[in-house]
Image (cartoon, helix red, strand yellow):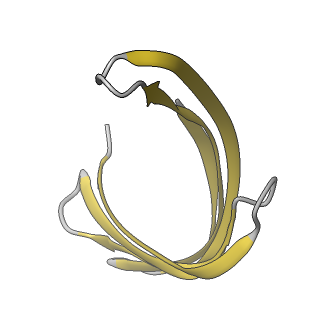
Amino acid sequence: FSAGVSLLYILKDNKKVDLYSYFGNRLQFDGYETNQYDNFGNVIATKKTAYTTYNIGLGIGFKIDLLEVLDINFQTGYALNDITDSFYTGLAGEIGLYYQL
C-alpha cells in the first residue's frame, strides 16, 4: 500500500508553458515472506517481514498545455528516500500526462 500528496506552486504562468516548484511525499507500507526448508524441500518455518518507508521530493517542473484538457508535466529535483530507516538521497525525475475535467 502506498499513499502520497504533492503540492505545486506556480512560479511563472504563461499561455502554453508554466514553470512551477513542487514538494511531494509518499508513505509506503510493504512486506515480504521468507521460508525455511528442510533437506526434503518441505517448509518448516515461515517469517513475515513488514516495513514502512517515507520519501520526500522537491524541485522544479514545466507544465505544457497540449490540448484544452490535456497537459504534460516534466519534473526534476532532489529526493530524500527512506528517511525513517536507511536514509539516502538522489536525483528525482518524473513525466506525467494529466487529463483535466
In the displayed image of the protein, which residue is found farthest to the left? Answer: 67
Q: Residue at x 46, y 27 (%)?
A: 35
Residue 16 in picture, x, y percent from top left: 32, 77
Q: Quadrant of residue 50?
A: top right
Q: Quadrant of residue 49?
A: top right
Number of numbered tags placed on the structure image:
0
Q: Is residue 1 left or right of residue 15?
A: right
Q: Camera-side residue: 88 or 3?
A: 88
Vertical side of 1 occupied by 77: above or below? below
Q: Camera-side residue: 5 or 18?
A: 5
Q: Camera-side residue: 50 or 100?
A: 50
Q: Residue at x 29, y 22 (%)?
A: 40
Q: Camera-side residue: 1 or 75?
A: 1
Residue 9 in picture, x, y percent from top left: 65, 67
Q: Quadrant of residue 24?
A: bottom right
Vertical side of 92 occupied by 6: above or below? above
Residue 91 in picture, x, y percent from top left: 55, 83
Vertical side of 75 occupied by 83: above or below? above
Q: Quadrant of the C terminus?
A: top left
